[in-house]
């Protein structure tokens, strides 16, 4: 091999090495794990090859709970956050003064530590012997009896988690949509206005189709992101998510790997691959559903 | 330092659908004399930039050798050839000041050649003075005009005292007025430094005006090498004749018959007078004895026309454009092939009556060139 | 025409007012948790627990919670750990991605485009999947509870290589050739010419990666169970579970403020760059 060719590979070497060890090898390895039945971490032995791990995971009530939680979280937060982000972005786009100011504030949750701010949410919603908490104070104004959002009814817990998830993901969506809106050619809008088109009609017939690729992008990435929810749940309900009944699929994977249930990489792998398959399927459905409807560019 | 091409060929592998390899430089075999200003001239895609890159070593030839003086540099990497290069877009480092740009090449020197900061600064100031940018040393390239950027690029190329200075389309990014000024500047710098300077251009006027020697190229082949006036007056083939000169040369279908040159039905010159000046009449041969007409391509320089009411070449007059010193006569002739209209440049005092529908010319014999209609080769000694 | 002329201004004005209301309400919702964390962190322990009905202000702010946060739990250590982790990871990553991006953008070698395509396809691998094996790998190497174990898996990012490569390619070729003619070695060209020219992209990548590092939770949580190596995210969770006693909320909030502050300051200073970078880069990782 010529020396100058070697040089190119040399420059790539660190990246190839790291990617190989920590990304490519694990990909194959995890598939192997998921089929190795009765893998023992300490002795690194297994009984046989088969689908046992998948069967186990699919029968595990913790996994089913995590699956249910995750699905509900996805169904609630993806449409809500995307819709809310769209409305806020349009509002933001329509004003001229203080635009920069609002944009900065809205982006703030993106740069905060999910775990740290989650604690604040926990406190705002928690009901303790000392205090009903701020949220219950507000509800009390409307005559609603205090609810424990953190350790109380399932719906209340799901509400807090969804609320926090939306709070966390919104900055990114608002940012993407405001830049998409800023990219829409002003002349199109002006032309429509001169033709006497009302603001609602302009929005639905011109602006929205123009930014539809970005909305679609947000929906896809939103689905993927919501399926991988974990840190937000930990932030609010603590590390023992199974006990709180608020575990997510990713949380289940990590708990299987390490934690209270302690060291079952086979089950973890099977669960992770199931998650991957779900996400892949949803993404493909999204892609198919949007085909033809979204203006491609 | 003289630069010698010895049967140099450069082929590029074909790409995509067109799998044929491209011959960018085809058997270059000539010598560029020391201390001169040389223009490599040709239409785009003729291989002139490839030739430049071969000289500086960014490309290596497929076959043949390149020598600087006695030294074979074919296998030597660019940095050890001692060449300075000025790129078409100047390739200045945008984040460095003018001075930092100029001393950048010096900072690459190693070992005994290594200069102190002071020496580098002194050299930078010296060369900046030469190209008259010494007042701009602390500016960044984005704060300079195109002409100033060009000078910085030249200064950067000169600072390491190159054996050969190469310029790729040095004037193409400048506006018309700066272009005139800058080409004088390049001439002046070359004369001051005496360094062998080779520049590439597609603009024949630019090449003609400042070069000691021009190399006219097309499709990877050298068509002619010579002093600009020589090449203009005595082109080797139709391509060279057409490529040089503004307005361009006028090309007609013609024939030789009965010892005369015909354009259409008009005998415009007797055969003997067609010979270029200085051509040896004895060896030049005479008109072929046969009466059979021989087709030729006739090319007449715009200044080869003389308005003459009794002249043999009759053209339909379209316009007379007065350009001050000269007058352009724009007219048509059915046998003209190079353009829709003939452009003849004549003295202002001789301008024809523009109201008339026809104009008649006689021709200056040494401005009439004959070419083989098949090969485009120049016909000068009979055949 | 009459219809439009009379109708449009009213509906536009109503929409405008609605827009402002929405923006202000969401702005308050975003800011409120920050206000609450700061407020709570300034309330005395006794005062806070005496409030059955939470108060929106405090008349006797105190810094004692901050003192508690730094003394009762090793908050300073978490802080330093995170700083080291962030700086080293980001630094190493910059070197790795710069070299790779340069190879892809500037050097020529057989199979370059194919390798690049393979790199891009790696972006589709979900992190959750590979964490399992990486956990096992790092455990087998005996690197749990070590900075090496924390850092190694995250020093490469295909996405940033891609971003940087695109940027490198925008620099005119002639700059490289000019440097070659002047005898500049590739590495010198890379670090003295290319990197300074592409500094805006490098800065963006640095900031985004630093934010990611500062907030990372999953990997550190898996790989460290010794408080000596906790990062702030893991630390805050530890504080929550076993820290000051579950009820010392003000001290907990003081810790939250301390952890959140560096990023908020960085964000306010570099907000244009960060937002542009995120908008350009889409999703993290």
Image (spheres, helix red, strand yellow):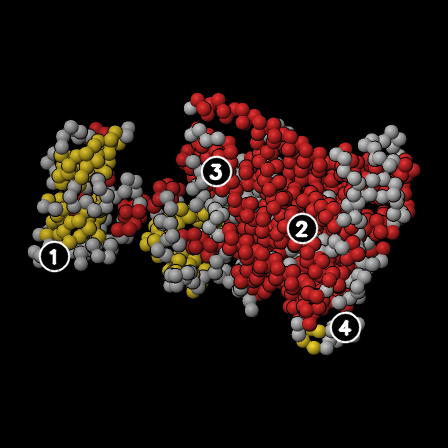
According to the picture, the residue beneath numbered tag 3 turns out to be A206
- Along the horizontal axis of the image, is C149 left or right of C192? right
According to the picture, the residue beneath numbered tag 1 turns out to be B288
Give how far apart the Cα atoms at labels 3 and 1 are. 79 Å
The image shows residue B166 at horizontal and vertical percentages of 47, 49
The image shows residue C123 at horizontal and vertical percentages of 61, 57
Residue at disc 3, secondary structure = helix
Mark found first going from the N terminus, 4 or 2: 4
Q: Which mark is residue B360?
A: none
Question: In percent of the image, x 23 and y 43: which residue is there?
Answer: B339
According to the picture, the residue beneath numbered tag 4 turns out to be A40
According to the picture, the residue beneath numbered tag 2 turns out to be A73
The mark lying in front, picked from 3 and 1, is: 3
The chain under label 2 reads: A
Q: Quadrant of residue B325?
A: top left
Residue at disc 4, secondary structure = loop
Residue at disc 2, secondary structure = helix
Give how far apart the Cα atoms at labels 4 and 3 are. 60 Å
Task: Tell which of A32 and C189 is nearer to you.
Answer: A32
Task: Tell which of C138 and A234 is nearer to you.
Answer: A234
Question: In percent of the image, x 72 and y 64: which residue is there?
Answer: A60
The crowd level at tag 3 (other Cα within 10 Å; few <14, some 14-19, many 20+) is some
Image quadrant occupied by the C terminus of chain B: bottom left
User: Residue most toward the bottom?
Assistant: A47
Question: In percent of the image, x 21 and y 57: which residue is there?
Answer: B374
Q: Quadrant of residue A141?
A: top right
């Amino acid at each position: 091999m010529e020396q100058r060719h070697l040089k190119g590979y040399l420059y790539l070497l660190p990246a190839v090495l790291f990617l190989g060890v920590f990304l490519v090898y694990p990909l194959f390895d995890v598939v192997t794990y998921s089929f190795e039945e009765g893998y023992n971490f300490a002795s690194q032995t297994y009984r046989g090859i088969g689908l046992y791990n998948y069967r186990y995971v699919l029968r595990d009530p913790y996994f089913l709970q995590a699956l249910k939680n995750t699905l509900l979280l996805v169904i609630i937060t993806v449409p809500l956050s995307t819709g809310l982000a769209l409305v806020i972005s349009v509002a933001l786009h329509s004003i001229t003064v203080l635009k920069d100011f609002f944009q900065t504030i809205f982006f703030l949750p993106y740069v905060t530590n999910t775990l740290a701010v989650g604690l604040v949410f926990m406190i705002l919603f928690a009901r303790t012997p000392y205090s009903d908490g701020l949220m219950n104070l507000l509800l009390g104004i409307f005559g609603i009896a205090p609810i424990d959002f953190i350790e109380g009814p399932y719906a209340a817990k799901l509400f807090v988690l969804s609320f926090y998830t939306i709070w966390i993901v919104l900055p990114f969506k608002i940012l993407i949509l405001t830049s998409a809106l800023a990219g829409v050619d002003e002349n199109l809008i002006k032309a429509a206005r001169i033709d006497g088109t009302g603001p609602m009609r302009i929005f639905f017939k011109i602006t929205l189709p123009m930014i539809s690729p970005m909305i679609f992008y947000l929906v896809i990435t939103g689905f993927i992101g919501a399926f991988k929810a974990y840190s937000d749940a930990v932030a609010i309900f603590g590390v023992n998510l199974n006990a709180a009944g608020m575990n997510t699929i990713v949380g289940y994977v990590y708990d299987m790997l390490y934690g209270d249930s302690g060291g079952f990489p086979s089950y973890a792998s099977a669960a992770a691959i199931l998650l991957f398959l779900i996400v892949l399927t949803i993404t493909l459905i999204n892609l198919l559903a949007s085909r033809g409807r979204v203006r491609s560019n | 330092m003289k630069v010698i091409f010895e049967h140099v060929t450069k082929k590029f592998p074909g790409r995509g659908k067109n799998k044929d390899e491209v011959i960018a430089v085809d058997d270059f075999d000539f010598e560029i004399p020391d201390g001169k200003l040389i223009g490599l001239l040709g239409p785009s895609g003729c291989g002139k930039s490839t030739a430049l890159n071969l000289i500086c070593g960014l490309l290596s030839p497929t076959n043949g050798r390149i020598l600087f003086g006695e030294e074979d540099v074919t296998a030597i990497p660019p940095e050890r050839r001692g060449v300075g290069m000025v790129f078409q877009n100047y390739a200045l480092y945008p984040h460095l000041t003018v001075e930092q740009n100029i001393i950048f090449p010096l900072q690459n020197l190693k070992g005994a050649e290594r200069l102190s900061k002071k020496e580098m600064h002194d050299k930078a100031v010296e060369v900046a003075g030469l190209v008259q940018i010494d007042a701009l040393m602390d500016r960044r390239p984005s704060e300079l005009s195109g002409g100033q950027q060009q000078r910085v690029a030249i200064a950067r190329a000169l600072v390491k005292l190159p054996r050969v200075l190469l310029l790729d389309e040095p004037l193409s990014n400048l506006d018309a007025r700066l272009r005139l000024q800058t080409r004088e500047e390049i001439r002046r710098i070359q004369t001051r430094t005496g360094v062998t300077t080779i520049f590439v251009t597609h603009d024949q006027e630019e090449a003609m005006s400042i070069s000691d020697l021009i190399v006219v190229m097309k499709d990877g082949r050298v068509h002619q090498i010579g002093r600009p006036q020589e090449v203009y007056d005595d082109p080797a083939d139709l391509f060279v004749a057409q490529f040089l000169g503004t307005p361009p040369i006028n090309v007609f279908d013609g024939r030789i018959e009965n010892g005369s040159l015909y354009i259409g039905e008009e005998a415009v010159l007797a055969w003997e007078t067609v010979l270029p000046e200085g051509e040896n009449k004895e060896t030049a041969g005479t008109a072929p004895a046969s009466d059979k007409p021989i087709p030729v391509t006739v090319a007449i320089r715009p200044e080869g026309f003389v308005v003459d009411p009794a002249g043999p070449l009759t053209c339909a007059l379209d316009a007379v454009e007065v350009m001050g010193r000269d007058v352009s006569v724009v007219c048509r002739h059915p046998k003209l092939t190079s353009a829709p209209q003939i452009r003849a440049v004549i003295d202002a005092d001789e301008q024809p009556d523009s109201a008339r529908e026809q104009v008649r010319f006689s021709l200056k014999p040494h401005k009439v060139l004959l070419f083989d209609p098949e090969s485009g080769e120049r016909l000068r000694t009979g055949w | 025409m009459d219809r439009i002329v009379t109708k449009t201004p009213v509906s536009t004005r109503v929409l405008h007012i609605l827009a402002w209301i929405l923006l202000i309400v969401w702005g308050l919702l975003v800011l409120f948790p920050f206000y609450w964390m700061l407020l709570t962190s300034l309330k005395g322990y006794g005062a806070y627990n005496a409030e059955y009905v939470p108060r929106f202000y405090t008349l006797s702010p105190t810094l004692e919670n901050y003192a508690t946060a730094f003394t009762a739990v090793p908050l300073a250590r978490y802080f330093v750990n995170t700083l080291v982790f962030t700086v080293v990871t980001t630094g190493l990553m910059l070197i790795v991605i710069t070299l790779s991006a340069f190879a892809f953008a500037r050097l020529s070698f057989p199979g370059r485009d194919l390798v690049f395509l393979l790199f891009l396809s790696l972006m589709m691998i979900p992190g959750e999947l590979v964490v399992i094996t990486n956990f096992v790998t790092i455990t087998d190497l005996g690197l749990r509870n070590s900075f090496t174990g924390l850092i190694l898996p995250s020093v490469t990012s295909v996405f940033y290589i891609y971003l940087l490569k695109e940027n490198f390619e925008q620099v005119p070729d002639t700059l490289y050739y000019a440097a070659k003619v002047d005898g500049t070695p590739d590495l010198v060209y890379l670090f003295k010419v290319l990197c300074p020219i592409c500094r805006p992209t490098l800065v963006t990548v640095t900031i985004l990666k630093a934010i990611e590092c500062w907030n990372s939770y999953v990997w550190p949580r898996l790989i460290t169970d010794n408080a000596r190596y906790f990062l702030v995210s893991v630390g805050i969770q530890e504080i929550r579970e076993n820290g000051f006693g579950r009820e010392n909320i003000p001290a907990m909030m003081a810790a939250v403020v301390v952890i959140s502050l560096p990023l908020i300051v960085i964000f306010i200073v570099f907000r244009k760059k960060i937002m542009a970078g995120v908008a350009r880069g889409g999703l993290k990782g």
